[in-house]
Image (cartoon, grey):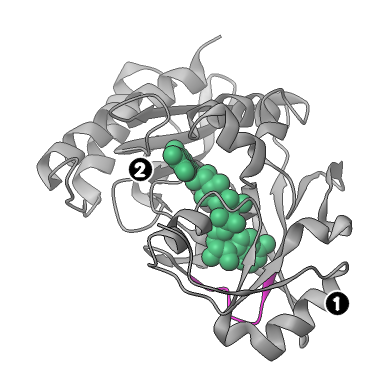
Amino acid sequence: MKTAPFKYHAPSTVDAMVSLLAELGDDGKVIAGGQSLVPTMNFRLARPGHLFDLNTVAELDFLRVEGGKLRIGALTRHAAFHSPVADGALGRLLADVVHHIAHYPIRQRGTFCGSVAHSDPASEWCLVTATLDSEIIARSRRGERVIRGGDYFQGTFATELRPDELLTEIRLPLFDASWRAGFYEFSRRAGDFAISMTLAAIRIEAGRIVEARLGVGGVEDRPRRISEAEAALVGKAPGADAFGMAADIVSKTVRPMEDLHADAAYRRDLVRATTRRALEKAAAP
Ligand SMILES: Cc1cc2nc3c(=O)[nH]c(=O)nc-3n(C[C@H](O)[C@H](O)[C@H](O)COP(=O)(O)OP(=O)(O)OC[C@H]3O[C@@H](n4cnc5c(N)ncnc54)[C@H](O)[C@@H]3O)c2cc1C
């Protein structure tokens, strides 16, 4: 099918974009890579009267390390992460995660921030954003605000972002050399959305885990950290006993959704496996 008619706008600055959102945002949508929005418009599940093109806002096309953070501008495509974009565990982690997102042509157009704005519960970048103490920068005519990654996701396709707000940037803290990170995803076929995935980051000192971040996606209606499992890992030696225990806690704690691909019991079982394997990947030499 083809989209319903809409009026196209090509603002060239963030200020012009947020003015359009303030005036027409109730009947309009930002288009970034279009890889989620255009299919929903083609199926007429979305019928915005106005499209505001982000691709003409050149000031949002940046990706850089600054002040101990990776700053990801709203025009950064998935493909930018095919090679490590930062030193250490964060760059390696993102370069591993990106290969699970869709397929090569989609990764050339789709954006990191577009995924987070869209908020599919099985999106890999949403899991990264929810797990890694990120900051989400939202701009409107009222000014700029920072939303914490842990507070941002409100459910399937539901976020803290307001209709008149533009997501301009996401900031991820860099890991220092004491951190290790691992990601493991299960999906039916390469490029499909995850049925279960886990991101694990552990900081090790003197052979013990002293800090942990552990998040799951594709399992519940939103990605989230499982703080019970994080707390249980602290003080333990990295290895099969600690990882098996954390995986059991995650499996017991989640409230899995059910859909065409998997029922709740299967997801609960899968998340135990993806968690153990993500932790094993994190600890691997
Ligand atoms: C076949 C296929 C397979 C896919 N598989 C995966 C997968 O495995 N994992 C995965 O994560 N994704 C997958 N995707 C989705 C893809 O990653 C999209 O690129 C991504 O979800 C949205 O990014 P986008 O830049 O294309 O956003 P768009 O499609 O342009 O926009 C999506 C939504 O976000 C809003 N939006 C976009 N940018 C902003 C912004 N800066 N501020 C405010 N609102 C904004 C739009 O208004 C729209 O509502 C798949 C897509 C396809 C077609």
Q: Does the magenta stretch include residue 162?
A: yes
Spatial separation of the CA atoms under disc 2 and disc 1: 43 Å
- Let me know if residue 66 appears in the view: yes
Q: Find residue 43 and report its horizontal and vertical position in percent.
A: 38, 60
Q: Position of residue 248 (x, y in %)?
A: 22, 35
Residue at 36% x, 40% y: name it. Answer: 232
Type of secondary structure dominating the magenta stretch? loop
Mark seen at residue 221: none
Task: Identify the secondary structure beneath mark 2.
Answer: helix
Can you give x and y, in whole percent of width and height, for residue 200 in the image? 47, 34
Q: Is 245 inside the magenta-drawn segment?
A: no
User: What residue type is disc 2 on?
Assistant: Ala
Residue located farthest toward the top when viewing the structure as drawn:
285
Rendered-image quadrant of the N terminus: bottom left
Which numbered marker is on residue 229? 2
Where residue 48 appears, as percent x and y from the top left, is: 53, 76
Q: Where on the picture, by quarter, is residue 109?
A: top right
Q: Residue at x 38, y 67 (%)?
A: 45
Q: Is residue 127 visible?
A: no
Closer to viewer: mark 2 or mark 1: 1
Q: Give the range drawn in magenta.
A: 159-166
Q: What element carries label 1?
A: helix
Quadrant of the image containing the C terminus: top right
Category of crowding for the residue at label 1, using alpha-carbon neighbours closer than 10 angstroms: few (below 14), some (14–19), many (at least 20): some
From the image, tell me which residue sits under label 1.
15
The residue lying at 34 percent from left, 31 percent from top is: 275
Eyeballing the image, is 231 above or below 104?
below
Q: How crowded is mark 2: few (under 14 residues within 10 Å), some or many (20 or more)?
A: many
Q: Is 169 left, or right, of 185 in this rendering?
A: right
In the image, residue 176 above or below residue 166 = above
